Amino acid sequence: MKKKVFVQKSVILYCCLFLFLTIMSLCVYAAIVLIAQGINSFLRCAYLLVTIGSFMFFTYTFIRFARNRIILKLDEVFVPEHWGSDKQKTQFETHIKYEEINNIYIISSTNNSLNKESKWIFTPMPYIIFECENNIKKAINVFYYSKKQVINIIDEVVQRVKTLNNKKLLKNGKQIFLEFTESKVSKNH
């Protein structure tokens, strides 16, 4: 099995990225206009600083989004941690060995991947939970991944677990996703 990398793809992500790129473009345009007209007042200087600061912030945010990924290596699932302070992160660095996986399911939570309270999570986010040996649970945040991607990630992990002569009976991605959506519907009624 080759190494596979899953990058975020969802309508929410593309809308956010479009908005970020639009704002970045406007910042560059505003900076060029301000420099071309000359910086002859404090207000123009402040506009220029705000424009440059906004461009830097949105560039950083774009790189943060682009950096988030799920990597299926030959022997493990690896997810790098998100940038930011520990109170802001939704995903911490995670290593999950295929031979340790006993069960896979999806939950929705306002906690981070370590199941600890996070300062900036206001809406429940979906996590793929891997139950490992010794009843250890490891979580991967899949908020910005499409339904199809989540199913493919789970299917690929299940296939890799089974190729290691692991006789554990794991459900496929569609079954796991269906259970997740049914549990959300039953909670709402």
Image (spheres, rainbow, N blue to C red):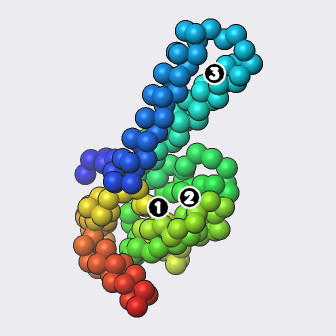
Q: SS at mark 1? A: strand
Q: Answer yes or no: do the residues labelled 1 and 3 have beta carbons within 8 Å?
A: no
Q: Are marks 1 and 2 in contact (CB under 8 Å)?
A: yes
Amino acid found under the numbered disc labelled 3: Leu
Q: Is residue 134 above or below residue 2?
A: below
Quadrant position of the C terminus in the picture = bottom left
Q: Which residue is mark 1?
A: 141
Q: Disc 2 residue type?
A: Thr
Please state the horizontal and vertical placement of residue 142, each as a whole percent of the image. Answer: 42, 61
Per the image, the residue denoted by label 3 is 48
Image marks 3 and 2: residues in contact by CB distance under 8 Å: no
CA separation in Å, label 1 and label 2: 7 Å
**Image depth: mark 3 or mark 2 in front:** 3
Check the image and report above or below for 101 versus 38.
below
Look at mark 2 in the image and give the residue it sits on.
90
Circle 2 SS class: loop
**Identity, as a three-letter code, of the amino acid under mark 1:** Asn
